[in-house]
Image (cartoon, rainbow, N blue to C red):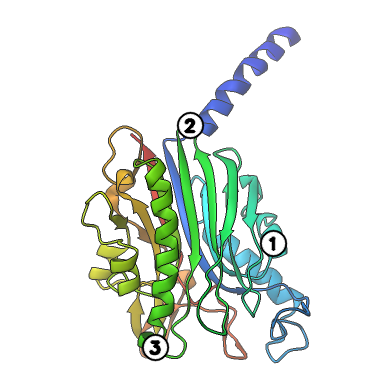
Amino acid sequence: MKNILAFFIICLIPILSYSQNNKTESIIAFYNVENLFDTINNPITMDEEFTPESDKKWTNNRYQKKLNDIAKVISSFNDTDLPVIVGFAEIENKLVLEDLIKTNYLKDGNYKIVHEESSDIRGIDVALIYKTDNFEYLNHQKIPIPLNTKYKVRDILYTKGILNNLDTVHVFVNHWKSRSGGQEKTEPQRVQCAQILRNNIDSILLINKNAKILIMGDLNDEPTNKSVFETLRANNSGDTESLHNLMYTLSENGLGTHNYRGKWSILDHIIVSNNLVNNNKSLNVSENTGHIFSAEWITFTGKDGNKSPNRTYGGPNYYGGYSDHYPIYVILKKQ
């Protein structure tokens, strides 16, 4: 009897492994997590405001709460499965991601981390985590943005891997120059970010015109702004050189991922190469659209009834919320 049971288990293992690695649907997400810092003062970056001694009083208890809050959000996109890939903006270092993936909400995802330190003066970076059961990591690199200003901006993080044993995908995680100082005044810097990203995309498409490309990030511009619509060419025209912005229709419908003084904007984007929306043979974007996760429990409602993402801080004031951005996600399905 024991021999029969052992034989059955041995036969079952490859079946379960094949099932895990050949999912019919995969969630791909991005989240600007609003200053996910540890509590340790790094002497080479301006992170002093996120320490226990600062005006913000960033204690270990608040840090642990933030980790669990962010992990809960990520685990809530779907009732049955965790995202395969999650890109992040505003994380301080690899340590905070190591702590994040150990939380009870995410520990079953068997996540690994892709991260590189950037030259941002505050020390905030972009990064990516992926489920090892469903994404085979191949390589990654950081792409510097040499802006013609005294301020540094976050590098673009590029990761290449194989999704669900189906296709090679190229993932770019971004956090472009903020609008601090004025939208028009800072626009040329975001255009420069877009041009560098576009150059790298063109290099991939030159080798393989059918490459599966996923661009995600806080671009600090909306779908119709010059950097996104013209320079990056995420204009949804369907021509061979354009990209498809999965947030475009949501923006047209008045939805947003960020609220500034009562005005909603889509600053967070997931953009894909056209063969991920017009492909009947392999991976395809389910419903040809993106999703904004805006559950009531991560939303703040003011006395006037206006809603916004429930943020962690407003200046030095601790609100105990999740982030000042809503996360976004798409579902890739196997045809």
Determine which residue is flagged by label 2.
22
Please state the horizontal and vertical placement of residue 78, each as a whole percent of the image. 46, 51
User: Cα distance, mark 1 to mark 3?
Assistant: 33 Å
- Identify the secondary structure beneath mark 2: loop
Q: Name the side, left or right, on which 85 lies relative to 230.
A: right
Residue at 42 percent across and 84 percent down: it is 186
Confirm whether residue 229 shows in the render: yes
In which quadrant will I find the N terminus? top right
Residue 247 lies, with reference to residue 330, above or below; the image says below
Please state the horizontal and vertical placement of residue 178, each as a whole percent of the image. 47, 80
Determine which residue is flagged by label 3.
185
Q: Earlier in the sequence, mark 1 or mark 3?
A: 1
Residue at 68 percent across and 66 percent down: it is 93
Given this view, does label 1 or label 3 mark the residue nearer the observer? 3
Work out whether residue 19 or residue 167 is closer to the camera in this orientation and state it: 167
Residue 20 lies, with reference to residue 191, above or below; the image says above
Residue 270 marker: none
Question: Label 3 sits on what residue type?
Answer: Lys
User: Cα distance, mark 2 to mark 1?
Assistant: 29 Å
Please state the horizontal and vertical placement of residue 108, each as a whole percent of the image. 64, 46
Residue at 39 percent across and 40 percent down: it is 208
Residue at 36 percent across and 84 percent down: it is 306
Q: Earlier in the sequence, mark 2 or mark 1?
A: 2
Determine which residue is flagged by label 1.
94
User: Cα distance, mark 3 to mark 2?
Assistant: 47 Å
- Identify the secondary structure beneath mark 3: helix
Q: Name the side, left or right, on which 334 lies relative to 133.
A: left
